[in-house]
Amino acid sequence: MIKPQKVVVVTGASQGIGATVVREFRKLGYCVVATSRSIKPSGDANILSIAGDIGDPATARRVMSEGVARFGRIDTLVNNAGIYIGKPFTEHTDEDYAAVMNVNMAGFYHITRLAIAEMEKHSSGHVVTVTTSIDQVAISGIHSALAAMTKGGLNAATKSLAIEYAKKGIRVNAVAPGNIKTPMHAPEHHEALAAFQPIGRMGETIDIAQAILFLDSAPFVTGEILHVDGGQSAGR
């Protein structure tokens, strides 16, 4: 019996961690549904690119329906899309709050709900979400209240969903990065950001992609928050 080709959905897929995740899943032969606001069409027939705001439920519906129509199924969802706005808490605006909630929370909610419903049809699947370590270990001088509130909520939802769907063959995990070299961080800030990791350097996007691939290949792991942060969550 020939096994069907596996299919992964990746949000925030146009750059940084998301682009690396797309590349690494393709190396393993997965078909990829890649989405972000700015993503461009791919020349790879096994990558379906869908541009849109992941916080908009219409985008989530389009990603899932077009992905299933093209590839027939959804095996894995990687919730990578996220934004960070670093300001003192009292300087945040209503627009800041709305933007962070739209991507970090609504973006997770709409597509995860649809993906799990699709996975239930096959009694198998895996959701892995890129969160953060900052919800557990606050760092003096880092303005992280909105990140901690939203990404910490996703860590909690990961455990809740893992238990809710454990007997339905669907696993739910998270990867909690430290400071990673992505377009989110300007090069002139890299040295200062590296100092927050006890290991003494910033992470690379491949560090997070490899953690996601590990979780995807580990059938007895669910409800796990895997810290890939150079020791940041352990203490400093």
Image: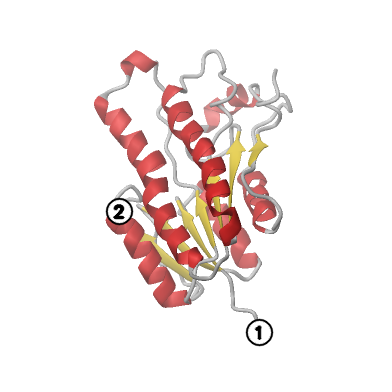
Outermost residue to the bottom: 1
Q: Quadrant of the C terminus?
A: top right
The residue sitting at the right extreme is: 199
Colour mapping used in the image? secondary structure
Q: Which residue is mark 2?
A: 57
Q: Which of the 4 image quarters holds residue 118? A: bottom left
Q: Position of residue 87 (x, y in %)?
A: 39, 20
Q: Is residue 65 left or right of residue 34?
A: left
x and y percentages locating residue 147 in the rendered image? 45, 29
Decide: is 230 above or below 109. Answer: above
Give amino acid for label 2.
Answer: Pro
> Is the N terminus in the top left, top right, bottom left or bottom right quadrant?
bottom right
Q: Is residue 185 visible?
A: no
Q: Residue 32: which numbered mark, if any?
A: none
77 versus 95 height, above or below: below
Amino acid marked by disc 1: Ile
The x and y percentages for residue 158 are 54, 43
Query: Circle 1 is placed at which residue position?
Result: 2
N-terminal of the pair, mark 2 or mark 1, is 1
Proximity of marks 2 and 1: CB atoms separated by less than 8 Å = no
Quadrant position of residue 126:
bottom right
Q: Give the percent coordinates (x, y) of residue 59.
A: 32, 57
Taking depth in this image into account, of 217 and 180 the one nearest to the observer is: 217
**Is residue 56 positioned above or below 159 on the image?**
below
For image coordinates 47% across by 72% down, the residue present is 43
